Structures are given as structure tokens and as C-alpha cells.
């Protein structure tokens, strides 16, 4: 289970990096020359920016949730090793 969550987290991180690089940072970026052409034809100029921004926030939220779930599962399975019982 932990391996599957780690793989999902890695895939999410790669997608998040790609989306951040595609964004248009105040005056021109990769969006206008690389991915913006296809996105503008499908969604229009303003819709592509909204879509990329919403996708960025969604991937960031998914990354946050995956990290929390993975941390809970990892510490839950090793909790006896981390905390010594009080005698």
C-alpha cells in the first residue's frame, strides 16, 4: 500500500512540475509558445489560463492529501518502534 501511494505521489509531483512550467508568468512563458496554442484553440485564451490554474491547485491539494495519508500509514505501521512504553 505504501509503495502504491509513493508511486502516486511521484506521478503527481511530475504532473505538478509540468503544469507549473506551462503556466504563463506575468508576460509570457512556455504557455504562449509551447502549450498555449493548443489550449487556446480548445478553450479560448481566458479559459486555458483558468483551466491550468485550477489544475495546479487540484494537483497541489492531491499531493497534500497523499503525503498526509502516506505519513499516517507509515507511522501507524511502525508506531511500536518509535515510542517506548512508559513503565
Image (cartoon, grey):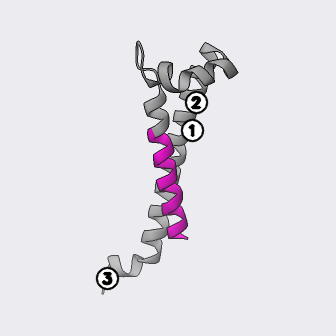
Q: Which residues are magenta?
A: 1-17
Q: Are marks 1 and 2 in contact (CB under 8 Å)?
A: yes
Q: Residue at x 53, y 62 (%)?
A: 5
Magenta-colored stretch includes residue 16: yes
Q: Are marks 3 and 1 in contact (CB under 8 Å)?
A: no
Residue highlighted by disc 1: 58
Instruction: Name the residue at the right extreme.
Output: 42
Q: Quadrant of the N terminus?
A: bottom right
Q: Secondary structure at mark 3?
A: loop
Q: Residue at x 44, y 70 (%)?
A: 74
Q: Nearer the viewer, residue 15 or 37?
A: 37
**Direction from residue 39 to residue 57 in the image, left or right:** left
Camera-nearest label, 2 or 3: 2
Residue highlighted by disc 3: 86
Q: Is residue 46 above or below residue 55?
A: above
Chain-order first, disc 3 or disc 1: 1
Distance Cα–Cα, label 2 vs label 3: 48 Å
Distance Cα–Cα, label 3 vs label 1: 43 Å
Instruction: Name the residue at the bottom extreme.
Output: 87
Residue highlighted by disc 2: 54
Query: At which x and y percent is residue 73?
Result: 49, 68
What number is the disc on residue 8?
none
Camera-nearest label, 3 or 1: 1
Amino acid at each position: 500500500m505504501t509503495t502504491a501511494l509513493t508511486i502516486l505521489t511521484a506521478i503527481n509531483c511530475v504532473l505538478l512540475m509540468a503544469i507549473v512550467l506551462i503556466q504563463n508568468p506575468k508576460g509570457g512563458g512556455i504557455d504562449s509558445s509551447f502549450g498555449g496554442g493548443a489550449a487556446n484553440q480548445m478553450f479560448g485564451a481566458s479559459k486555458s489560463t483558468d483551466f491550468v490554474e485550477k489544475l495546479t491547485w487540484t494537483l497541489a491539494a492531491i499531493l497534500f492529501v497523499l503525503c498526509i495519508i502516506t505519513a499516517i500509514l507509515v507511522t501507524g505501521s511502525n508506531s511500536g518502534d518509535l515510542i517506548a512504553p512508559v513503565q
